[in-house]
Amino acid sequence: MCPTKCRRHPHHRGSTAAASTVEDWREEAINGGTLKHVDLHTGINGWASPPGEVFSLRGPKYFSKKTKTPSGEWLLNPAGVDWLRSNCRLDHVLARPDNRIMAALRNSKCPEKSSKTFIIAINLQVPGRDHYSAVFYFSSKIDESIHSNSLLYQFIHGSDAFRNGRFKIVSKIVKGPWIVKNTVGNYSACLLGKALNCYYHKGPNYLEIDVDIGSSAIATTILRLALGCVTAVKVDMGFLVESQSEEELPERLFGAVRICQMEMNSATFIDNTMPSRKVLPCEDESENEDE
């Protein structure tokens, strides 16, 4: 039994979803990020969790009727956001000895629960004179494992070729100048694994996806435009594994985040000369290679 009781806490403020219990480590992770957790509707310079219904995904009849429907609840829970700056590109942040998410998980007061937790981290790498990373963390739900017959399980344990053909982002500009909405579009969907170079790092209890935005000249240009007025922009981003057959429908988000009028100078500097944690023998990185 856990030495302390987990408190009831609404993991996305302002949504219609019911509050759920939050493990001690995840509450620390949500509230201790370098980008603060803010109110969904009124927060600025922070992040929040938009409800799934703000995103339209492929519905049960998509391949016959091309209909999309609002997404349901996320498959994973939010576990924090980091906005980082470094002297060079930050790769495989979950393997760093100073990564606060993995440290919180290791130090959990409920080890019998946290030992079963799986983390997915999405590291959006922003190129420039200074290298920035927006890292979004999502965790498996309390007392729930990721079902072995699910599309998400196939994505986690599949080859890089499979992941590249399925890793999808849906985004929506909630608030922003006309030029940003006109360039990016109010709502868009993209297979990130095909549009950009994505690198997958798999450990015994995590999968990290490093997305190199600098690998596309078009994406870099659009991003620079958006960053030029980032303090005026609110954007929702949802992440999912694309369904490509009727049996895989309907699509489901595994996580979503709203970035609320972020300030570039709020990023925390990370010394990238620090070596990454050595991969343990059980962490077979050969899974990163295409099968």
Image: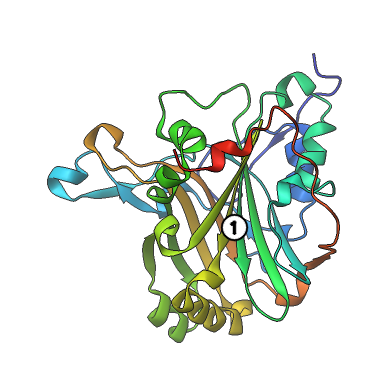
In the rendering, at what x and y percent does residue 267 appear?
76, 69
Q: Quadrant for the N terminus, please.
A: top right
- SS type, badge 1: loop
In the rendering, at what x and y percent does residue 104 appear?
81, 39
* Residue in the foreground of this view, choosing between 33 and 260: 33
State left or right for residue 58 relative to residue 279: left
Is 235 drawn above or below residue 40 in the view shown? below
State left or right for residue 262 relative to residue 86: left
State left or right for residue 250 relative to residue 210: left
Are there few (<14), some (14-19), or many (20+) residues within 10 Å of tag 1?
Answer: many
* Residue in the foreground of this view, choosing between 285 and 127: 285
Q: Quadrant for the C terminus, please.
A: top left
Residue at label 1?
40
Q: Which residue is found at the position 75% from the left and 32% from the top? A: 280
**Which image quarter: residue 135?**
bottom right
Residue 46 appears in the picture as rendered: no
Q: Which residue is found at the position 78% from the left and 72% from the top? A: 87
